[in-house]
Amino acid sequence: MLPFCADQNIALTPYSALASGRLSKHSGETSKRLTEDSYAKFKYDKTAEADGKIIQRVEELADKKGVSMTEISLAWLLTKVTAPIVGATKISHVDGAVKAVDLVLSQEGIDYLEELYIPHELAGVMAQNGKQKAGNVV
């Protein structure tokens, strides 16, 4: 989708920029949201194994650069879009988002983060939109 949008000069504004917190947590780290957010579990649990490989790479790159996983994740996203939607429930969330703006990832780092990525199927409302055919959902 990104190449098409870039070709057609269509702006993207992604939501859930940190995959409901998954891209900001170290291996084994948990939170109330990770344990209780049933919608996020619905969206991400079926791809947890593949996503875990990406999360591990985010963690490795964050450790190597001495920054947070949030900073790495959002710095990568900012190489793709200019206005991601980032939720924050704590001041530390805002701090990580602000710091990401100044973090520059090398092309090698970007490639490393993207190498194992497998696109997710649409879920929830987006999946319910379905394809349109003669005014009917098929």
Image: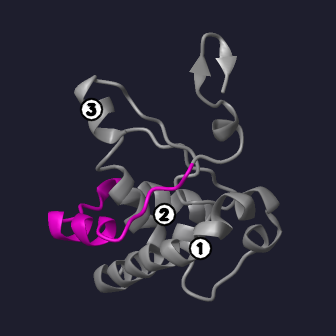
Q: Residues within 10 Å of mark 2 (few under 14, many from 20)?
A: many
Residue type pointed to by label 3: Ala
Q: Residues within 10 Å of mark 1 (few under 14, many from 20)?
A: some
> Residue drawn 68% across and 16% down?
136
Q: Which mark is residue 48?
A: 1
- The quadrant of the rendering that contains the C terminus is top right
Badge nearest the viewer, 2 or 3: 3
Q: Nearer the viewer, residue 136 or 91?
A: 136
- Is residue 94 one of those drawn in magenta? no
> Badge 3 is on which residue?
6
Do the CB atoms of the residues marked 2 and 1 lie less than 8 Å apart? no
Which type of secondary structure does the marked residue at label 2 adopt? helix
Q: Which residues are magenta?
A: 101-121
Where residue 33 appears, x then y in whole percent?
75, 67
Quarter assignment of residue 110: bottom left
Q: CA distance from mark 2 to mark 3?
A: 27 Å
Mark 1 or mark 3, earlier in chain: 3
Q: Nearer the viewer, residue 134 or 52?
A: 134
Q: Is residue 18 above or below residue 9?
A: below
> Residue drawn 23% across and 66% down?
111
> Badge 2 is on which residue?
96
Residue type pointed to by label 2: Gly
Do the CB atoms of the residues marked 1 and 3 lie less than 8 Å apart? no
- The quadrant of the rendering that contains the N terminus is top left
Residue type pointed to by label 1: Ala
Q: Residues within 10 Å of mark 3 (few under 14, many from 20)?
A: few
Which type of secondary structure does the marked residue at label 1 adopt? helix
Q: Is residue 57 above or below residue 45?
A: below
> Residue drawn 66% across and 30% down?
129
Q: Which mark is residue 62?
A: none
Where residue 125 appears, x then y in whole percent?
71, 38
